[in-house]
Amino acid sequence: MQFCDDCGSMMVSQDGVMSCTNDDCGATTERDEELAEQFVSTEAQSDDELIETVEGAEFEGKPTAKDVHCDECGHTVAWYTIKQTASADEPPTRFFKCKECGYRWREYN
């Protein structure tokens, strides 16, 4: 796997040139044929495999948790994601977003 020197995004091989996958960047570099044998192209990652990292990002399409309680509006259904925020021997953290009002909270197991 090769990463863009300008923005750090993953690069893909297109027509003998390595191109940055970040549309805003668009950097390209010559393809090193000796290294080309080491590169394997894979399918693009789908949006449902991504973990939300931006405050304004949407949770739609993520799993929902029932029987949770939103402290802001009292609604009992929320979207959630799970992230490993501590060392591997610690349980993961669940991040929730209320389906009714959008309030966010976390739960440590």
Image (cartoon, helix red, strand yellow):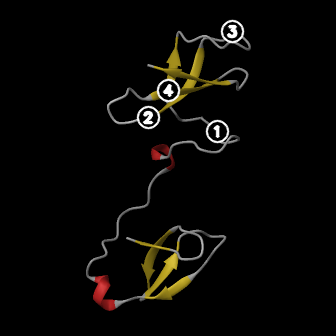
The residue positioned 37% from the left and 28% from the top of the image is 90
Q: Find residue 86 and name its label.
A: 2
Q: Position of residue 28 (x, y in %)?
A: 54, 84
Name the kind of residue labelled 1 in the image. Answer: Glu
The local crowd at label 1, few if under 14, some if 14 to 19, many if 20 or more residues have their Cα within 10 Å, is few
Q: Position of residue 32 (x, y in %)?
A: 37, 89
Instruction: Judge depth for marks 4 and 3 and give the one in front.
Output: 4
Residue 28 position (above or below residue 66):
below
> In the shown orientation, is residue 77 left or right of residue 49?
right
Q: Earlier in the sequence, mark 4 or mark 3?
A: 3
- The residue labelled by disc 3 is 74
Name the kind of residue labelled 2 in the image. Answer: Ala
Q: Find residue 58 and name its label.
A: 1
Instruction: Judge depth for marks 2 and 4 and give the one in front.
Output: 2
- The residue labelled by disc 4 is 94
Instruction: Judge depth for marks 1 and 2 and give the one in front.
Output: 2
Disc 4 from disc 3: Cα separation: 18 Å
The residue positioned 65% from the left and 23% from the top of the image is 99
Residue 44 position (above or below residue 56):
below
